[in-house]
Image (cartoon, grey):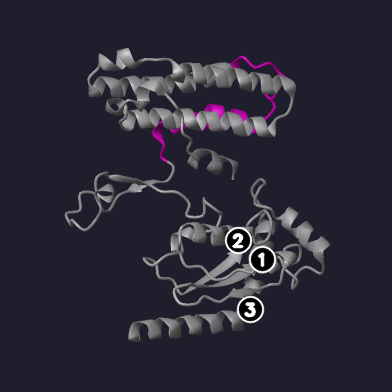
Amino acid sequence: MFFCFLFFYTFAVSVLFVSVPEYTDSAAEEYLRVYNALVKLVDLTRNLIKQPTAVSDLDKLEKILQDMVNCNKSELLESKDPDGRKGLFQQWSLDLLGAVETWSETLEDGTFTTHGQFFLLVKRVLPLIINWEWGTTSNFLYQYPDPSVPPCLTSKDRFHLIDAGIMINVAYPSFLGDKRDIDLIIAPEYSAGNMFETLTLARDYAVSMKKPFPEIDNKILEERDWPKNCYVFEGKAKEPTIVYLPLFNRQNCKDEEEFKAKMEEYSTFQRPFSQEKIDFVLETAKANMKNNNETLLREINRAIHRRQNKLQG
């Protein structure tokens, strides 16, 4: 989770020469992407490590990066043609990574040099930022001649894709609205954090974007410490119906204390699960589906009839 969160987040940065329109091209954007990823790495590491010496070292790294990016190089850019500017930005990206590696080599033992994950990032992951292959796949619409396809989907030979659930950890936003026209969403809830949080976030998103969403009564929040095994939020008109299935619930946890213990033990924010844990989660999810078989079939049938009525009406 830590790594995915780092590499898919974007941040705005104010840099004089990149804000000039004629210098804002793909090479400049890649340079800023590298800088933003490094800044986010510093921020996340600072949240994880509290030793004063380590925090001071991170402050030094942040200043090094800021000084490198904020240096006014507009005159140098003006003297270059597009290919020359591209080469400069590529070199400056490598310089940023080199600065991080140089900084890491100067750290004294006892700060956070024992944190293997951080140095794994420095040694192995940071060089991959230059290539940025995460989420990249061939664009099957590249140069597609149909004018009805937006140019933004046909102009590049590769796509950069992200997890549909990155916004609120469940992909509700991708399935809302008239273009999707969804009748039924079956939503197993396996997220870390408070129960119903992704559901209420999706509701708030739908309100802000004026997209149809079923009514979610805030009274269900009273059950978040020991939820039922199934909730049905019936959609009306253009709203989808949502069947919400908490992984741990009153059916497989005898009380709030056991529910809390299970949520902590099987939180997504931890190292890879053992095979035993994987098997347990899988069997628990299977049992939830079996226990709610009648409800699921009923709502699927209702969705089918609803769709038929739409087509006939």
Residue 289 painted magenta: no
Asked if residue 251 can be seen in this view, the reply is yes
Mark closer to the observer (2, 3): 2
Q: How many marks?
A: 3
Asked if residue 127 can be seen in this view, the reply is no
Q: Are marks 2 and 1 in contact (CB under 8 Å)?
A: yes
Q: Is 248 in front, or is 72?
A: 72
Mark closer to the observer (1, 3): 1
Kind of residue at badge 2: Thr
Mark closer to the observer (2, 1): 1
- Image: magenta residue range: 105-133
Residue at 55% from the left image edge and 27% from the top image edge: 122
Q: Position of residue 163 (x, y in %)?
A: 48, 51
Q: Position of residue 192 (x, y in %)?
A: 66, 54
Kind of residue at badge 1: Asn
> Is residue 306 rendered to the left or right of residue 281?
left
> Is residue 108 rendered to the left or right of residue 124?
right
Element on which disc 1 rests: helix
Residue at 47% from the left image edge and 59% from the top image edge: 173
Please tell me how crowded label 2 is: few (under 14), some (14-19), or many (20+) other residues with Cα within 10 Å.
some
Residue at 26% from the left image edge and 19% from the top image edge: 84
Give the labeled residue for mark 3. Answer: 292
Give the labeled residue for mark 1. Answer: 218
Sequence-wise first label, 2 or 1 = 2
> Which quadrant would the C terminus be assigned to in this image?
bottom left
Sequence-wise first label, 2 or 3 = 2
Sequence-wise first label, 1 or 3 = 1
Give the labeled residue for mark 2. Answer: 200
